[in-house]
């Protein structure tokens, strides 16, 4: 997975992507690049509640609009870790205008995804039967998730791979979900860690944040996924 490819090769990393609590990039906190998707909500809640400081997580979170921007931040050494693309759950949505309710109807249609990420792998897996029949399906690169959602809901594309909360937003505006089952749903979701690099202290912060989300409901924290990006 592309997200894993950018994981630092720090010799303190263990098999689960964890590092010692005293990791230091020379400037202080572990810099984490995230995108505003539901899987990142625990990290944003941990930051909002000050858990990363109070539980000595020693991390700073920066939001980006697309996973490609997170990867670029990693490549330019502006971030030490990023959200693991393979931990994000994508849903296949089709536009109301296209009236597509089955994978077979995607022949000669346009699907938006991130060609460097897991959403592309899932799109390819979904249309594999069509490709084997030598039927054309076009997967285009649309990195920004807000843009991808708007293109779908306005009918500028036929389908898109979207995570939450964008998938639900699209459904509310008339989009239809094509169920991805079996290998299609599992493709690209091999890693279980939210971040490409983490620490025990950050994991403790995330656990406390998840407990808070479970207690009060994720809807009460959804506003943390909204608003301007910090980069």
Image (cartoon, grey):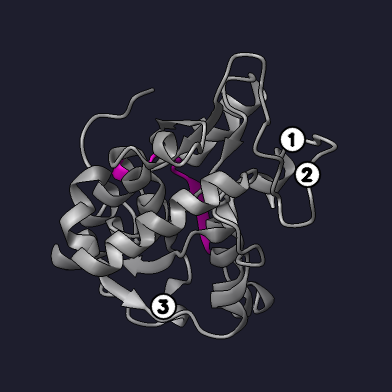
Q: Nearer the viewer, mark 1 or mark 2?
A: 2
Q: Nearer the viewer, mark 1 or mark 3?
A: 1
Query: Where's residue 11, x and y in %?
Result: 85, 37
* Residue that carries the numbered disc 2 in the rendered image: 13
Disc 1 crowd, CA 10 A, few/some/many (<14, 14-19, 20+): some
Residue 228 lies in quadrant: top left
Query: Where's residue 145, x and y in %?
Result: 36, 45
Query: Disc 1 and disc 3: Cα gap in Å?
Result: 42 Å
**184 or 103, which lies in front?**
184
* Residue that carries the numbered disc 1 in the rendered image: 8
* Residue that carries the numbered disc 3 in the rendered image: 105
- Looking at the image, is mark 1 or mark 2 earlier in the sequence? 1
The answer to whether 99 is drawn above or below residue 76 in the figure is below
Q: Nearer the viewer, mark 2 or mark 3?
A: 2
Question: Quick one: SS at disc 1?
Answer: loop
Q: Is residue 81 left or right of residue 20?
A: left
Question: Quick one: SS at disc 3?
Answer: helix
Q: Which portion, as a residue range, is magenta? A: 137-146
Query: Where's residue 159, x and y in %?
Result: 37, 62
Q: Which residue does the image show at 43% across and 63% down from the upper left? A: 109
The answer to whether 29 is drawn above or below residue 185 in the figure is above
Q: Which residue does the image show at 45% across and 42% down from the upper left? A: 55
Q: Which residue does the image show at 45% across and 59% down from the upper left? A: 207
Disc 2 crowd, CA 10 A, few/some/many (<14, 14-19, 20+): some
Query: Where's residue 167, x and y in %?
Result: 30, 62
- Evaluate whether residue 182 shows in this view: yes
**9 or 47, which lies in front?**
47
Report if the CB atoms under discs 1 and 2 are less than 8 Å apart: yes
């Amino acid at each position: 997975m592309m997200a894993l490819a950018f994981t630092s090769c720090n010799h303190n990393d263990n098999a689960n992507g964890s590092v010692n609590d005293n990791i230091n990039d020379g400037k202080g906190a572990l810099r984490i690049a995230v995108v505003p998707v539901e899987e990142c909500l625990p990290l944003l809640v941990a930051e909002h509640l000050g858990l990363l400081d109070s539980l000595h997580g020693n991390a700073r979170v920066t939001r980006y609009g697309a996973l490609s921007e997170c990867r670029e931040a990693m490549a330019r050494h502006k971030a030490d870790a990023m959200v693991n693309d393979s931990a994000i759950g994508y849903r296949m949505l089709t536009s109301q205008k296209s009236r597509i309710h089955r994978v077979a109807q995607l022949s000669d249609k346009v699907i938006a995804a991130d060609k460097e990420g897991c959403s592309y792998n899932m799109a390819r897996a979904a249309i594999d039967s069509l490709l084997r029949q030598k039927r054309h399906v076009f997967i285009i690169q649309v990195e920004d998730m807000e843009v991808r959602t708007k293109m779908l809901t306005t009918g500028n594309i036929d389908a898109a791979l979207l995570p939450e909360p964008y998938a639900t937003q699209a459904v509310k505006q008339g989009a239809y979900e094509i169920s991805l089952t079996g290998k299609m749903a599992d493709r690209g979701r091999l890693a279980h860690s939210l971040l490409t690099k983490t620490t025990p202290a950050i994991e403790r912060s995330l656990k406390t944040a998840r407990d808070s989300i479970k207690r009060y409901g994720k809807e009460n924290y959804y506003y943390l996924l909204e608003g301007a990006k910090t980069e």
